[in-house]
Amino acid sequence: AADITAMTTDAEGNLYVAASFTGEIYVTDVEGQEGEYEEFVGAEGDYFIKKPTSFLAKYDANGNLLAVKLLNATQSAPAESEYWGSASYSVIDKIVAEGDKVYVQISYNGNVVIDSIELEAKYTPYFGYACMDNVSYSVVLFNSDFEAMANVAELSVNTEDESMPAVESFNFAVSGDDVYVAAIGYGSLIYKTAEKTENINFFLNGDNGESEHAAMV
């Protein structure tokens, strides 16, 4: 089972498509003949997360399959805490092709390793003895052959904040060599780029459920 989650094209007419899936999947080209496909095996998922694994594929303008990249997430919950979570997952939410660069927005819980890039899971303490998953977002830069080049921007919760912060939404845009990020969240969040790490604190009152749902750009 698979769901397409993002698509785009570049100036040369190449198609970039991403999907989330479970179990075994076949990524075919325009011919779709037996033996002329890429076969992948992903995680099985659970009741809450039906399709935990993702792939990114590139086709030329004639529908020939040029490259495929698989994204798997693995759980790494702290051993000293009871884990109150679900299956780890990665989802490709958006693709932007700019020249020979491909920018990919990934939402994930669990650890995701893409070549030399490591996207680290964030777990929040809960009631002092358990931990919960928190969704993180990253914009990862690939070259045209899907080799991961850099983790351009990352937004996640501050794991020291026990009041259950969250990143509620995330998006990005590209203009030339500049990348613009916008997000909404509450509580204590951490924004990371290659140049800096910044702690952003939005209002969160755990006693009565009030929170800012504030925007950052």
Image (cartoon, rainbow, N blue to C red):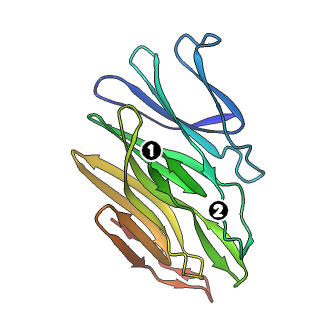
Q: Tell me the kind of residue under disc 1.
A: Lys
Q: In which quadrant of the rendered view does residue 4 lie?
A: top right
**Secondary structure at numbered mark 1:** strand
Q: Mark 2 or mark 1, which is nearer to you?
A: 2
- In the picture, the quarter occupied by the N terminus is top right
Q: Height in image: 199 above or below 44?
A: below
Residue drawn at x 66%, y 29% as measured from the top left: 25
Q: Position of residue 56 (x, y in %)?
A: 50, 35
Determine which residue is flagged by label 2: 76
**Residue farthest along the right direction in this orientation:** 47
Q: Is residue 80 left or right of residue 4?
A: right
Residue drawn at x 52%, y 64% as measured from the top left: 168
Q: Height in image: 97 above or below 52?
A: above
Residue toward you, 119 or 97: 119
Q: Position of residue 212 (x, y in %)?
A: 47, 78
Q: Which mark is residue 94?
A: 1
Q: Is residue 24 left or right of residue 179?
A: right
**Secondary structure at numbered mark 2:** loop
Q: Tell me the kind of residue under disc 2.
A: Ser
Residue toward you, 41 or 33: 41
Residue drawn at x 40%, y 77% as measured from the top left: 200
How would you rate the neighbour count of disc 1 (Cα within 10 Å): few for under 14, some for 14-19, many for 20 or more? many
